[in-house]
Amino acid sequence: MIRLIAFLTSLTLLVACGETQLDEAPEDLGTFKMRVGYIYTDKALQWPLSRNAEGSDWNATLQNSLDGRLRRYEGTQEYDVAITLEGFMLAPPGIPIVLSPKSVAVVNVFVYDVAGQEYLAKKHQMEIFESTTGESAVLGSGHSRTKEEQIAGLSLNIVDAVEEWMAKQHQENGWFDLRSDDVEIDPAAPS
């Protein structure tokens, strides 16, 4: 029993160190600048066993997370980013250690290139889980967090995952690369 408690304690400390933060270092997003960040939660489905919440409970928190993370990029090309909350389950209180459910959300992400007038991503679906903290690893987030704290944590994880996914698309597929029509030609430069 002592070994189990020691193992759970060390696992809890490891997991808690990996919790997502709002002020993490920016990713490489090339020339990205968010013109519009849009959140849509009206049709979000609350899944069985979830704590009671409305889609509108997510609006301000998810918008603040999106703005906090993506408005810090000051590139030269504008893009619109939309996140639609499709469904969620906010973990209810469970049985500590034995059954400690995690909160989860499913979102669709849209990325629109304003100058190119095309979608880079149209309805890319992502499933996002909440981070585990020291308390929630043992007690479950239903015991250790309020509904608002669960929504805030999931909102930050959603935007973090979107930002990392966009950085991967930039690296692998050239999203947010400088377009040739955006390069200014210096008239004094020799030809």
Image: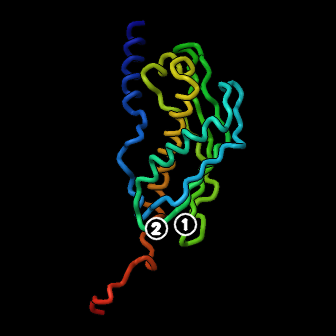
Picture quarter with the N terminus: top left
The x, y position of residue 45, in whole percent, is: 71, 37
Instruction: Please determine whether, in this image, residue 148 is positioned above or below residue 10.
Output: below
Nearest to the observer: residue 107 or residue 98: 107
Tell me the colour scheme of the image.
Answer: rainbow
Instruction: Please determine whether, in this image, residue 179 is positioned above or below residue 151.
Output: below
**In the image: residue 113, left or right of residue 174:** right
The x, y position of residue 60, in whole percent, is: 57, 40
The reply to whether callout 1 and callout 2 are in contact (CB within 8 Å) is: yes
The kind of residue tagged 2 is Gln
The x, y position of residue 184, in whole percent, is: 38, 80
The x, y position of residue 5, in whole percent, is: 41, 11
The kind of residue tagged 1 is Asp
Nearest to the observer: residue 63 or residue 122: 63
Rendering quarter of residue 15: top left
Task: Determine which of the numbered discs, if any, sits on residue 113 in the image.
Answer: 1
Element assignment for label 1: strand
